[in-house]
Image (cartoon, rainbow, N blue to C red):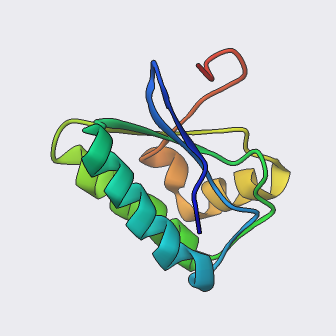
């Protein structure tokens, strides 16, 4: 899948694909886990800049990363949520476990 990522001051930033469904979720999960391990990341930023769709499999990826990083006192952030993704965050309760960055907090 070749996930786009960047090491930033806040932590490891990962760009979520346009569609995060069951097909892409396993690939993203594996790549993010590998990146966390290779870069010894404690904080993770999911960037939803290009994301238009996310189903329950995608939600599971996010929850799993929160759980795994929580063991080392890490934090999972999200940024660039569009209206559709914001609704998913609200309905699923993701806002309770993932800190949503506002404009200006992105770096």
Residue shown at 47% from the left, 44% from the top: 98
Left or right: 60 in relation to 51: left
Q: Relative to residue 38, is residue 94 drawn left or right?
A: right
Q: Is residue 96 left or right of residue 86?
A: left
Side of 12 where 83 appears, left or right: right
Numbered label tally: 0
Quadrant the C terminus occupies? top right
Residue in the image at 76% along x and 57% along y:
51
Residue at 64 percent of width and 78 percent of height: 21
Residue 77 placement (x, y as % from top left): 49, 38
Q: Quadrant of the N terminus?
A: bottom right
Residue 26, x across and y down, in percent = 47, 77
Q: Position of residue 68 (x, y in %)?
A: 25, 55
- Residue 83 or residue 31, whichever sits in front: 31
Point 76% across, 63% down: residue = 18
Q: Is residue 75 above or below residue 28?
A: above
Q: Residue furthest bottom?
A: 23
Looking at the image, residue 44 lies above or below residue 54 = above
Residue 97, percent across and down? 42, 47
């Amino acid at each position: 899948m070749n996930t786009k990522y960047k090491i930033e001051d806040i932590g490891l930033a990962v760009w979520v694909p346009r569609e995060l469904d069951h097909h892409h979720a396993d690939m993203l999960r594996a790549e993010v886990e590998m990146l966390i391990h290779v870069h010894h990341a404690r904080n993770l930023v999911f960037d939803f800049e290009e994301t238009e769709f996310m189903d329950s499999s995608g939600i599971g990826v996010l929850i799993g990363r929160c759980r795994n990083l929580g063991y080392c006192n890490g934090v999972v952030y999200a940024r660039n949520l569009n209206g559709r993704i914001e609704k998913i965050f609200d309905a699923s309760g993701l806002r309770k476990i993932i800190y949503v960055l506002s404009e200006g907090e992105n770096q």
